Image (cartoon, helix red, strand yellow):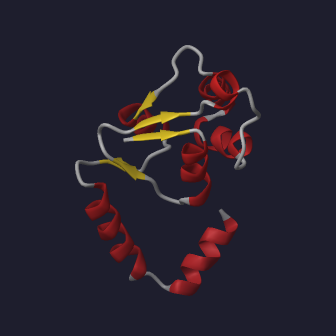
Amino acid sequence: GHCVGGGAGIAIGAADLRIAAPDTILRFNFVKELGIHPGMATTSLLPKLVGGAFATQMLLQVPHKDVSSTRARELGILLDVVEDPFSKAMSVATELAAANPVAMSSLLKTL
């Protein structure tokens, strides 16, 4: 489905790994469509994921409003694009749960 505005901001800010379905669309509609400054640390997190130039294009919606899941995967926003994101997420979570919790916590704090 669509991941728009605040939902897109939460997705990049609250998730360390993002998995989406092929029909997922990302749209950062804050400036052109809503007339507000992007929230949820979008202006600091998005450039770290995709680089400053492309983050600017995405936030200003130039030349396109939507970013396909395939393009988001190419840019590093998404870990994977699969037909069943829930099953894939559970598989990744199970794999990560087997890791040493102290090492995992330390890693995530330093990233």
Query: To which quarter of the image does residue 23 belong?
Result: top left
Residue 4 drawn at (x, y percent):
52, 38
Residue 78 drawn at (x, y percent):
44, 46
Residue found farthest to the left? 83
Quarter the C terminus occupies: bottom right
Residue 22 drawn at (x, y percent):
29, 39
| In the depicted structure, whether residue 18 falls above or below residue 62 | below
Relative depth, front residue between 78 and 85:
85
Q: Residue at x 61, y 27 (%)?
A: 54
Quarter the N terminus occupies: top left
Residue 104 drawn at (x, y percent):
55, 77
Q: Residue at x 64, y 41 (%)?
A: 46
Position of 28 with respect to 71 (left or right) is: right
Position of 90 with respect to 2 (left or right) is: left
| In the depicted structure, whether residue 41 falls above or below residue 96 | above
Query: To which quarter of the image does residue 58 belong?
Result: top right
| In the depicted structure, whether residue 58 falls above or below residue 19 | above
Relative depth, front residue between 77 and 29:
29
Picture mark count: 0
| In the depicted structure, whether residue 86 falls above or below residue 65 | below
Q: Residue at x 76, y 34 (%)?
A: 37
Residue found farthest to the right? 37
Position of 62 with respect to 36 (left or right) is: left
Relative depth, front residue between 28 and 93:
28
Residue found farthest to the top? 63
Q: Residue at x 49, y 85 (%)?
A: 100
